[in-house]
C-alpha cells in the first residue's frame, strides 16, 4: 500500500433531475466520485460518514477495485441527501434540497493504519475538519485539497491555515476568483499560490482545466462529449483521476501532473455521460487509455 | 499575389471604455483587425467603406505590411462608429452607441484585379452583401465567413444560401448555439456542417477554440494573458491569423488548419493586451513565433 491515496469527503444519496431523466437517491458525494476515479490507478482509503439507512452493498463494486472503507463511520441517523436539477446548460445547477443529516456532526477519526498514507486529498468539507484529518496522517508526502464558496466566505481564517499546509489546491474558476479577488485566472492562481500551495489547479468544466506552478502554466481542454447526461461529481472525478495517477506515478512533477490531469478530464468525460457513478464504475482501463490518446491527438498542432 | 487573402468587412471608428482606460475614435472594425493579423503571412486585399472623415493616414502602417486598400470606397458622409464598454469580465460587452453612417448603404464593388484572389474571408456583414462579394471573385479557391446573431435571426434564408457556398465558417459559441439550436458544441458543429461548410471553427474567447471537420475535432486553449486591456477585435484578429496562415501555407488540411488556429489565438492574445489595433500593429514576427512555441509547450502532456 506504498502508493495509496486517502480521501476525506462527503458520502451522499443524490437525487437529480436532468433533461435526460430523473434518478432518486443514487450513491454519490465527493468521497465516492473521487474513490471511483482514483481506484483506476491506486489503492484508495476513504474517510467519511453515512447513516444507518445507507445501502452499503452499493460500495461492493468499489471494494472490488481496491477501495478500503475501514475509515467509513456509520452514525445513527440518516445519510446526507442532496437534490439538484440541471437545465439544458449543464453548468447551470440548481440545488433543490440539502439535508446534511449525519454529515452535520461528522468528526473524522482515522483508523491507525491510515496514518502512513502518502497521497491525501481533502475534498470539499469544513476546513476545520480538513485540518483535523491532516493532523492524523503523519506519513503523508503529498496533500491536495478542494474547497467551495461557502467556506471561502465563512471560514477564511481556517481556509488560509489549511492552504498553507497543502501542496496543491484544486478548485473551479469561480472559486478561484472569489478566493483571490481577481477575475483573471493567471492572476488568481498567483494570489492563491501566495497562500502556500506549490500547485494550483483550476477546473473550468466543459472548457477544461489549467495548472499553475512557479510561473509555468499547463492548459488542458476538456474531452468533448456529445451528451452531458448528469454533471454531478465531474469535478471530484477529475480530482480522483489526478490524485490516483500521481500516486501510481509515485512522484509529482510537471510531467506526471500533466498526464494526471489528462486522465482526470478523461474520467470526468465518462462520468458526465451517465447518471451518478455509473459512467466510471462501468468502465474498463482500455476505454480510458483510448480517450487519453484521443485527447492528445485532438490537441496536437 | 498567388497566395493573397481578401477580406470584406466593416471599417470603423471605435470608442471604448474599459477598466484600463478610455480611447476615442480608434480605427477598428472587422476589416482592419483581420487585415492587421493576416498581413503577418500573406498579402491582404480589403473591401470596405469609410466616410470622408476617415483619417486614411492611419492605414499607412498596414499598407507598409502589404495590405492593399484599392477596394476601399470613400463615400460621402461619416464613417461607421461604435461605442462600447467592457466591465471587469472582458466577455461582458455593452454597446453604448452604433452609428452605421456610410456602412448603412455599403454595396461592395470589387476592383477587377481582386477577382482572382484565392483565399476569401467574408467578415460579419449582411449575408446578402457577402453573397454579392462571392459572385465577384471567380478565382477563389477557399472561402470562409463569419456572421452574428443579428443575421441569424433576421436573414436566415440568405445566411443558409451563403453557408452552402463557403468552405469554412468561423463563429463564436453563442452564435453556433443560436444558429444550430443545440447547446452542445459537438452537436452544434454537426448541424452547421450539414448546412454546407466542410470546416466549422467555434471561438470560445478566453477558453480557446475548437475546429470540426468530418467527425474529427481539434481543441485549442487560448493563450493565457494577464491583462485584457481591450477585447475589441479579438475574434477578427483570430480569423485573420487563421486565413493569413492558410494562404501562406497554400493549402487547407488538418495540419495547416491546426497551426493556423494556433497562430490566430496567439495574435488574438497580443490584440487584447493593448487598445485597438496597437497590440498587433506594434508586433514583430519573432514575438509571434515565441508565443506559438510557448502555447504548444503549455499544452503538451
Image (tube, coloured by chain):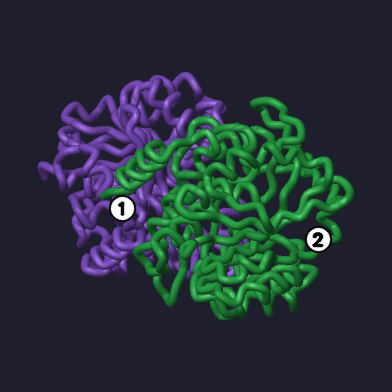
Chain colours: A purple, B green
The reply to the same-chain question for discs 2 and 1 is: no
Residue B108 in the image, given as x and y percentages of width and height:
75, 64
Q: Pick the quarter of the image with the N terminus of chain A.
A: top left
Q: Quarter of the image holding residue A41?
A: bottom left
On what subunit does the disc labeled 1 rest?
A
Q: Is residue B11 left or right of residue A78?
A: right
Q: Pick the quarter of the image with the C terminus of chain A.
A: bottom left
Question: In the rendered structure, are the residues bearing label 2 and label 1 in contact, judged by CB atoms less than 8 Å apart?
Answer: no
Q: CA distance from mark 2 to mark 1?
A: 49 Å
Q: Quarter of the image holding residue B147?
A: bottom right
Residue B85 in the image, given as x and y percentages of width and height:
74, 37
Q: Which residue is mark 2?
A: B106
Q: Is residue A79 visible?
A: no
Q: Is residue B105 visible?
A: yes
Residue at screen point 76% across, 31% down: B24
Q: Quarter of the image holding residue A168?
A: top left
- Label 1: state its secondary structure: helix
Q: Which residue is mark 1?
A: A262
Amino acid at each position: 500500500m506504498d502508493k495509496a491515496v486517502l480521501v476525506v469527503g462527503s458520502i451522499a444519496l443524490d437525487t437529480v433531475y436532468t433533461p435526460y431523466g430523473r434518478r432518486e437517491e443514487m450513491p454519490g458525494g465527493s468521497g465516492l466520485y473521487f474513490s471511483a476515479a482514483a481506484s483506476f490507478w491506486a489503492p484508495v482509503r476513504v474517510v467519511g460518514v453515512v447513516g444507518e439507512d445507507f445501502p452499503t452493498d452499493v460500495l461492493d463494486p468499489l471494494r472490488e477495485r481496491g477501495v478500503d472503507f475501514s475509515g467509513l463511520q456509520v452514525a445513527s441517523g440518516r445519510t446526507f441527501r442532496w437534490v439538484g436539477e440541471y437545465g439544458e446548460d449543464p453548468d447551470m445547477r440548481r440545488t433543490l434540497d440539502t439535508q446534511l443529516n449525519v454529515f452535520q456532526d461528522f468528526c473524522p477519526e482515522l483508523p491507525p493504519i491510515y496514518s502512513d498514507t502518502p497521497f491525501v486529498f481533502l475534498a470539499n468539507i469544513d476546513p476545520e475538519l480538513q485540518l483535523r484529518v491532516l493532523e492524523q496522517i503523519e506519513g503523508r508526502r503529498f496533500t491536495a485539497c478542494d474547497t467551495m464558496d461557502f467556506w471561502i466566505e465563512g471560514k477564511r481564517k481556517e481556509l488560509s491555515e489549511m492552504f498553507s499546509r497543502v501542496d496543491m489546491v484544486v478548485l473551479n474558476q469561480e472559486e478561484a476568483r472569489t478566493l483571490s479577488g481577481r477575475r483573471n485566472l493567471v492572476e488568481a492562481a498567483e494570489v492563491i499560490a501566495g497562500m502556500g500551495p506549490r500547485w494550483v489547479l483550476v477546473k473550468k468544466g466543459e472548457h477544461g482545466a489549467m495548472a499553475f506552478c512557479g510561473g509555468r502554466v499547463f492548459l488542458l481542454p476538456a474531452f468533448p462529449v456529445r451528451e452531458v447526461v448528469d454533471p454531478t461529481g465531474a469535478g471530484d472525478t477529475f480530482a480522483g483521476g489526478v490524485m490516483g495517477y500521481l500516486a501510481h506515478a509515485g512522484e509529482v512533477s510537471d510531467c506526471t501532473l500533466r498526464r494526471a490531469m489528462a486522465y482526470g478530464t478523461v474520467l470526468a468525460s465518462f462520468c458526465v455521460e451517465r447518471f451518478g457513478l455509473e459512467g466510471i464504475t462501468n468502465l474498463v482501463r482500455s476505454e480510458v487509455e483510448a480517450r487519453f490518446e484521443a485527447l492528445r491527438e485532438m490537441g496536437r498542432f
